[in-house]
Image (tube, rainbow, N blue to C red):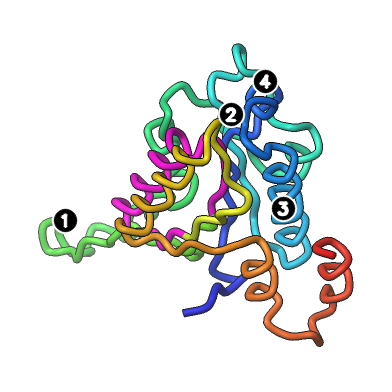
Amino acid sequence: MLLNAEESRLVLVDYQERLMPVIQDGAAVLANARRLAQVAKMVQVPVWGTEQNPQRLGPNDAQLRALCDKTLAKMHFSAVADGLAEWLAPPPAAPRGNARSLPRHLQKSQPVSSERPSIVVAGCEAHVCLLQTALELIEEEFEIWVVTDACGSRTDRNRDAAFDRLAGAGAELVTTEMVAFEWLRSCEHPSFKDMLGLIK
């Protein structure tokens, strides 16, 4: 199963100014998150960010924040608890009809659906906010793709434990380059040269 840009959204979790300096390999993690967001823009994948308690931890990295279509301020560690799932899969519109429409109890229920079911997610801290957000999105039946080289924690052990748990829950573990090449699919893609420039 390959990622499809037309079915993807990118969620970037808590790359905040006061948090990044304590993240192991924080500069590399942030650089990969920026690359992800830039490639997403090239292939028209929506990019959403989250910020944990921004009054205390500050906003996300300014360059990354500028690449996000929306940013969700949250107080829960999982962004799902503060409304991310509703952003990703808004409830279906109420059925329309007139007085001759079927009574409600005879109408087929419409499952919550998403035109873009593949959620590519990365962020900090991997074992707290990223983990809880991704696990709850899995419970909501999204396909979750965790970009490991764009995720960080204060220690490698915490980050790696998060990856183990996410893989066990059904998330696909990928890298920034895997995502970029799968979104483009071909060296004939109009953005191929620009993408190569970002990752080299």
Q: Amino acid at mark 4?
A: Arg
Q: Which residue is mark 1?
A: 104
Q: Position of residue 132 (x, y in %)?
A: 38, 39
Residues under labels 3 and 2: Cα distance? 16 Å
Secondary structure at badge 1 equals helix
Q: Amino acid at mark 1?
A: Arg
Q: Are marks 3 and 4 in contact (CB under 8 Å)?
A: no
Q: Position of residue 173 (x, y in %)?
A: 48, 62
Q: Earlier in the sequence, mark 2 or mark 4?
A: 4
Q: Which residue is mark 2?
A: 51
Residue 37 numbered tag = 3
Query: Was residue 172 drawn as part of the magenta stretch in this picture?
Result: no
Q: Are marks 3 and 1 in contact (CB under 8 Å)?
A: no
Callout 4: few (<14), some (14-19), or many (20+) C-alpha neighbours within 10 Å? some
Q: Are marks 4 and 1 in contact (CB under 8 Å)?
A: no
Side of 179 where 37 appears, left or right? right
Side of 198 where 8 appears, left or right? left
Q: Earlier in the sequence, mark 3 or mark 2?
A: 3
Magenta region: 121-144
Residue at x-position 44% and y-position 61%: 114
In front of the other: 30 or 144: 30
Residues under labels 1 and 2: Cα distance? 40 Å
Residues under labels 3 and 1: Cα distance? 43 Å
Secondary structure at badge 2 equals strand
In front of the other: 198 or 41: 198
Q: Which residue is mark 4?
A: 18
Q: Earlier in the sequence, mark 1 or mark 2?
A: 2
